[in-house]
Image (tube, rainbow, N blue to C red):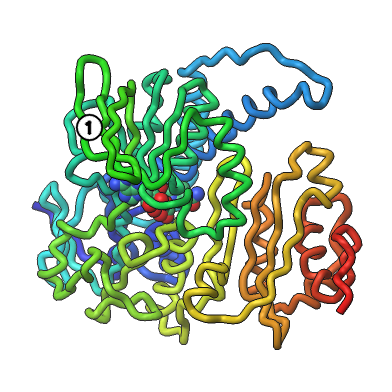
Amino acid sequence: MQTISTQLLVLGGGPGGYAAAFLAADRGFQVTLVDASGKFGGTCLQVGCIPSKALLHVAKLIGEAKDAPHFGVTFGPPKIDLKGVRGHWQKVTETLTKSLAKLAEARKIRFIHGKGKFLDAHTVVVDDGTQITFEHAIIATGSIPAIPGPFQINSKRVMDSTAALALEEIPPRLLVIGGGYIGLEMGTIYAALGSKVTVVEAGDGLIPLADRDLVAPLHKRLESLFEKILLNHKVAKLEEVGKNIRASLEDPSGKSIIENFDRVLIAVGRRPATRDLGLEKAGITLDDKGFIPVNDQRRTTVAHIFAVGDSAGEPQLAHKASFEGKVAVEALSGEPVAYDVAGVPAVIFTDPEIAWCGLTEIDAQKQGIEVKKLKMPWAGSGRALTRGRTEGLTKLLVDPKTERILGVGICGIDAGEMIGEAMLALEMGATARDLALTMHAHPTLSETLMEAAEQMYGLAVHSPPPRKA
Ligand code: NAD
């Protein structure tokens, strides 16, 4: 049995773990990183954000070719080489994985392949028996798909997001359970490749966290891409019958509907990967959702152990994990730092995309916050017209007294690229006037942010004239 001692132990090599490990090494810490997959990048790089975005790019190509007659160009129907499509994301993932390994090597980070478990507050044992004693630790073990009891059937036709990315086949009929991030992104990919996709969502709208006016244009477009979108429906039971999965659905009145599918994707959320880490031996107690409680420096209740990313609370987003990883290392270095952000950008990479940051209308209503809503429909954007995609909208929520921007929501192509400017505005405490006085290049979609802000002052020339008092 090998025994190692290290100054900083990082458990998990995803966007939270590797960002923390790299930054700590740059600050002179001697770092050991343990990861169960044996690779850097975590879920995001290996079986999440990056593969799905590579596949969504393929879906976008197919969608644009389909829309091309609108611009006077006609392509034939696409021929799908599934091996080539899979190869695309695998190559991207491989390239990034290798590059992270090189960056870690250059920083002299010791990498151990295995699953770590706490023995006490200063010792972790890896499953090959290696014992690691540490001065400080950062837990960044991420999350895993939540598969509720009724969906736990032993069939390769019932997939989580990882199995869906493997793209073993293009099932003629795919049932997607859950109309959130994964359900809609993966549903878009499969529908573009030729599956007839049915989405079953338990709530009364897709993407429950997002404002309804942002979801409406996406919902409309998905209605033509997908076979069916069933809201307020439940899936009571899944059974494998021959080559089919028989799904017992329940409509809003409680009536049972039986439908057969070739495959099913379960996308009803992810749970923190914290259950079998031996945290109780380190003196850490999980909250009732399984997250590791942390303070604003991402310290756990045991001061020399930190936790970041999906294991330490919502939202479960890669960029939040990396940000927290950096905060934890700065705190470890003795800096007066805190995780104190004006917002966390959220992007759903569907077509159109939905992106938002800061306050949403849903939250404003719940919290009784008075806001002025400035909305710029993309029908007034020259750039949106040139791309044949005018269904989008850009929305600012502004404090009516201070004129400060409190939240931004965008639905439209490339919304995910535009949300960066909105985040900067939030972090800088910008007012609508600041945004209105920032010259934006013409013709770009980003002008819609400026035009929305201009509405506050009656300066928006591409919007209908302001109502006279
Ligand atoms: P999600 O929380 O985004 O969506 C789950 C959906 O399933 C919700 O709409 C919920 O109402 C619905 N649901 C729950 N139980 C159900 C049931 N029994 N039947 C039908 N519907 C049900 O979760 P997800 O899509 O699994 O994604 C997990 C997490 O992964 C997300 O929260 C997100 O943080 C992350 N993620 C992010 C991105 C991105 O940033 N673009 C992409 C993929 C995943």
* Quarter occupied by residue 107: bottom left
For the residue pair 251 and 213, the one nearer the viewer reads as 251
Answer above or below: position of 2 versus 390: below
Answer above or below: position of 205 versus 139: above
Count of numbered circles in the view: 1
**Does residue 39 show up?**
no
At a point 16% along the width and 53% down the height, the residue shown is: 126
Compared across the picture, whether 54 is left or right of 461 comes to left
At a point 27% along the width and 19% down the height, the residue shown is: 244
**Does residue 408 show up?**
yes
- The percent position of residue 95, horizontal first and vertical second, equals 50, 37
At a point 74% along the width and 40% down the height, the residue shown is: 389
For the residue pair 450 and 96, the one nearer the viewer reads as 450
Tell me the amino acid under the disc marked 1: Leu
- The C terminus appears in which quarter of the rendering? bottom right
For the residue pair 63 and 257, the one nearer the viewer reads as 257
